[in-house]
Amino acid sequence: MKKSLTKSSLIWVIALSCAITAFFPGCKKTEYPLVPINQTLNITSYLEANPSQFSLFDQILQRTGYDGFLNAYGAYTVFAPNNDAVNLYLKSRGKTSVNDINVDTLKDLVRFHVILGDTITSTYFVDGKLRSPTFLGQYLTSSVINDGSTSSYYINKQAKVLQTNIILGNGIMHVIDHVLSPATQTLAQVIDANPKYKIFSAALKATGFYDTINVAANVNTNKARNYFTVFAQTDSVYATMGITTLAQLQAKYATTTNSLRNPADGFYLYMSYHIMPENSYLTDILSKPSHATLSPNQDVITDVLQVQNIQLDYDLINGVQYPGVSVDRPNSNVPSTNGVLHRILGDLYIKIFPPTRVDWDLADQPEFRKLTSVFRRAGQSSTALTSPLTNMSWNNSAGTVQYICQSTTSGTYYWWNDCISLSSWRSTPTSQINDMTFTTPTIIKGKYKIWFMYQRGSANSGVQFFFDGAPMQNVIPNLNTAYYATPADSGPVMESKGFKRYTEAPSSLTFNNIYNTNIGFLAGVVTVPTTDHHTFKIVAIGSAVAAVQVFDMVQFIPYDQDQESPRYFRRDGSIGN
Amino acid sequence: MHKKVIYKSVLVLTLVLSCSCNKYLTLYPQDGTTRQAYWQNKEQLQSAIIGIYSSLIQGTASTSNKASSSPEMAETLFIWGELRADNVSAGSNATADEVNLMNENILSTNVYANWTSLYRTINYCNNFLKYAPDVLSLDPTLTKAKLDSYMAEALGVRALMYLYLVKTFGDVPLKLTPTATDNDLVLLAKSPQKDVVTQILADLKTAEGTALRTYGDQASDKGRITLYTIYAIEADTYLWTYDYANCIAACDKIIGSNNFGLISGNSSFFNTMYANGNCNESIFEFQYDGSTTQVNPFYGLTGGAPAAQLIAQANVIGGLFPVDPNDDKNVDIRSSIAVNSGLQAIWKYVGTPNSSAQLTTTTSYRHWIVYRYAEILFMKAEACAWIGGRGTEALQIVLQIKARANSIYVQGLSLDYPTDPTDALAVTNYILDEKNREFIYEGKRWYDLLRNAKRNFPNNISILTNALALVLQPAFQQTTLAKFRDVNALYMPIPNSDILLDPNLVQNPFYK
């Protein structure tokens, strides 16, 4: 009895506590934070989840064993051929099943469809190679092709992109309608196989460059030079020059009777000038203004985009505009196992000039030229511009450079009356300009003395000069004290001290007269390696005092020429003795 | 006895409680008005109409409004009208989405593939159009004419919104009923562009009958839809569909009204037209007034030079606006309004001509001009060029605009006067060239290029590709020009967020 009573009371207690626990926690529900679970599939899982589209590519992955890593953590870009694409591929090889194909072939196939360590969305499908190479080593190219009504992205001009930017857990996937096949020929073989390049190909063989560009990049032992870009000329281009045989081409350019493989011979140089040691599709060509070639004399090819046309060697040299040759865009960007082949529509040759002086007005910058109401108009000045300009940049974004064209009555003596005025050269930290890099006009290769023309500044800081990154011999220790206050000194005496006068400022014995403060300073002697634009950099040295600093011009004068003639660089722009 | 008291009190309590239940469960919002309480009198109609105009400038402008998922309307219209065209470059603070638009790398997730602000205003219009007519029976002081004029305003704004949508996206969902409750949510599919245009024209025809010519004061005449605004939208729509006769007819109604004219191109041109706004040349403007919520989005987009998001394309000064080599004081009055050449800044909204002074975030409230008289003239000119036999008339109009602005002719840089006025394409190029100078940075350029590029597509696509080839990044130039050979690529993608929410909405096939 007692036992049962206890039992029933126990039941009551349990029931009661159940009721209480059932009631009270219900009142105050404990909120656990939701842990977000990423539902996005990884690449292999996505393929498995969509068998109607990708069952065959999935089979290939499984057969090659690559399904594992494509389902693991990483950042991949995959161009996935759909089932129709794989069926086309099988059919082209006369096979009915993925299992009929050699595993190694399939491995290469998959490796050519996968980019490791980079996720490339369609916004990066440029007009050339994608930014990272495939797992196989070769780059893929992208383009947009219109089939008459619709425009689509194409990969390698082989496969249309059916669906872009499928974002998955470990990468990004694009669906393509054909299987991509990597290039199998070397550049030399590609050129040789094209009947349009008979003369060019024969010339490559004659000069030995054929062998240079006949080694696939992955087997080349010289890893620093395993990719090439060739600008080839068709037989019809040669025909317009009256050249129909290799012998005629050789006769046009050869300068010696020695062996054709003589690096000093004009014909050898001519051929070497068509090959660049880099893997550059047309967009890569455009990304830099000039490119080195295999020429032993370090000749460069320059490039410029004229609306849609890519023009090579469109150069302004000594005031003469050379038209250069244009690139045949539709027939360019041909891939190979060791680089790219482009076609040009004219004859590309090395222009040979003796070293020639360049008088370079630092104030003649495209940004200032555009200000036609200011540029070289007396008494006008521009607003202060910030870095970078097209051909000028400096270290501090707060520092500014102003174009000033002095009024005719200002009493200053700049060439063209104009100069660049820096907000401050090594002064207060907020706006100080500590270094400034200029892109020079085209300078023909050779040995030059460089003269730097400036006005004496009130700042006690100095200038160190760099040409193509290498420091030059002389420095201006102090822009305030480095001027020339001895009017009696003749030109040669001044030159021996590393100075020269270049303005028409009237002679004066007065200390600190304008005559003495506009001065040319010999920065040093440089050997300009290539006929090209180069970088000229000035770096502030010495103590820091807040002050505006003004620079006028730079002269590049061949070192063996008279450094003092022409003597005068006048305010109206004329030059004379 | 006690029991009775208890029973009674329980009864009373129950009654009281059960009565209060009703009231307790029916809650009205404390901080808003319900539809049943609204739409009662003509004052509320007036408020609702002004509310529609307010929605055009709704949004908080800030220097970093990129973070907001839905940019305000004027920003959207500026971006749509300018970024894909040839006058804007990326400044140092440009966002990835802006740069992608400039390079035609548009994904449906781009922040400017967004029509929220336009459909929001459309919904306000739809609400008005549905509920306003009921007020006629509730407020005896409301006249039918007054109601109809309000209706015309709502129809006009809605037509304008749909016209922008059609020009930008092509086919768009056509929603003509209000979305007031969850029950009103419908999963709409896209309507074909021509159906939307038919609806736009039908609405405008209705509005034509009742829209007011004037509200009695200049600010309202420029900030609210008048009959002339209706004609302007009509002309724009007809030109978009290449219905030249009707376009000219609509333009002539505005020209013939003698209510508008070109203001003179003197030294006060900038102040009259842009700094003050509401000038005699203007037809319809978004009127920012400078109060905290009513600054425009342009400081955020173009202000703060040299560190602006968007800057002027390098060829605008020197190319589009050539400088007279013989006399630099002889200038096009529009050039220093458009661009500050020293800073390469877009100057129309934040600057003052020939000065480096800029407005600030709080003082940037110049109006966004939707239509002005000069554009009516250009629309007529373009229609005249194509209708046949009126090419000379078209060219005369261009000369009229050129003369007003002192357009500079420089041999080799400027387009030559077409020798053959019957050559519609040459005349059109001449018109477009001048229109670009006149309306630079006013959100017109892309639509002008697009309208002319898709005429007899793809025969005239070179109008668009020639303009853009110069300004595209070299790495994307060829891909972009190839994209434009697909007519679908000319339109923006349907916003990704809407695709996700509405299974009936199909993406533009180009954006696969």
Image (tube, rainbow, N blue to C red):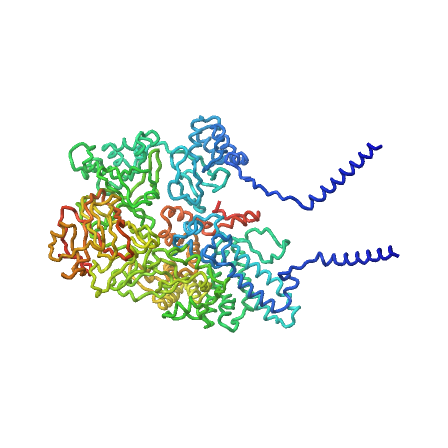
Q: Residue furthest right?
A: B1
Q: Nearer the viewer, residue A498 or A291?
A: A498
Q: Which of A385/A17 is in front?
A: A17
Q: Is residue A151 visible?
A: yes
Left or right placement of residue B182 versus residue A236 in this view: right
Question: Which corner quadrant holds the N terminus of chain B?
Answer: bottom right
Q: Position of residue A527 (x, y in %)?
A: 20, 43
The percent position of residue B481, horizontal first and vertical second, equals 39, 49
Q: Nearer the viewer, residue B174 or B219?
A: B219
Which one is in front, B433 or B459? Answer: B433
Mark yes or no: residue B451 visible.
no
Q: Is residue A71 left or right of residue B473?
A: right
Q: How far from the left and from the top, in percent, is residue B170? A: 49, 53
Q: Can you say whether B108 is above or below A383 in the image?
A: above
Residue A389, above or below A158: below
Q: Is B142 on the left-hand or right-hand side of B442?
A: right
Residue A518, horizontal then vertical, whole percent = 19, 57
Total count of labels: 0
- The image quadrant that residue A134 belongs to is top left
Is residue B492 left or right of A233 when viewed as pictured?
right
